[in-house]
Image: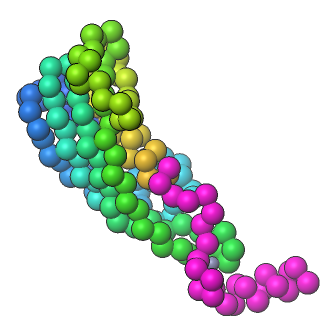
Amino acid sequence: MDTGEQLYSIDLKGLQAGVHRMEFPIETSFFKEFGENQIIGADLKADVTLEKTGLWLRLGLKIAGEVVVECDRCLGDLKMPVAVDEVISVTFSGAARDPEEDQMGDDVIELDRSETTLDMSQIFYDYVCLSLPIQKVHPDGACDPIMMEKMKDILR
Ligand SMILES: [Zn+2]
């Protein structure tokens, strides 16, 4: 892995306290690098709002756009909208927590205190994959008719 990791890394050491906004493109190559074969195309944009207060980081994560997956029924390309909107708390192991910052319901990521960068790529990957439904099929009647005929022949 070369440029991919850096592109999605946030330098935690140099980060000033306050609110930071960052945008990241997530394209087909991103999923290829992860060895993902379920997602065969992607045109997504991640919008990250990073709030740093002391030893605490809060990530507002929005990912929007669409991915292309294989339809479970006709095996044709299926475009699926992606809309992720999550808040993630990032804590550092061993760091004392401010109870007021300890919001219930947020997802929590714990980093080792020696970490100086936060790699967003794993986070993007996980949240996009999690947002997809288990069953991925075209709406009724929208499957590839030629493939559907072929399937019928096979099943006959
Ligand atoms: Zn289909």
- Is residue 39 rendered to the left or right of residue 88? right
Q: Pick the residue in front: 64 or 117.
A: 64
Compared with 60, 66 (above or below) is: below
From the viewer's perspective, is residue 40 above or below residue 7?
A: below
Position of residue 39 in the picture relative to residue 96 (left or right): right
Question: Residue drawn 37% across and 23% down?
Answer: 110
Q: Position of residue 152 (x, y in %)?
A: 82, 85
The answer, for residue 53, to whether it is visible in the render is yes
Is residue 67 highlighted in magenta? no
Query: Foreground: 125 or 95?
Result: 95
The quarter holding residue 109 reads: top left
Q: Position of residue 115 (x, y in %)?
A: 29, 20
* Highlighted magenta segment, given as a residue range: 130-156
What residue appears at the point 18 percent right and 47 percent down from the top-left corner?
22
Relative to 154, residue 26 above or below:
above
Q: Image quarter for residue 11?
A: top left
Say whether residue 53 is left or right of residue 122: left
Q: Quadrant of ligand 1?
A: bottom right
Quadrant assignment, res 95: top left
Q: Quadrant of the N terminus?
A: top left
Question: Which residue reaches farthest right?
Answer: 156
Quadrant of the rendering where the C terminus is positioned: bottom right
Q: Position of residue 60 (x, y in %)?
A: 26, 43
Residue shown at 44% from the left, 52% from the top: 128
Does residue 151 show up magenta in the picture? yes
Of 94 and 102, which appears nearest the observer?
102
> Could you tell me if residue 6 is visible in this image?
no
Q: Is residue 144 above or below residue 7?
A: below
For the point 33% across and 9% down, the residue is 94
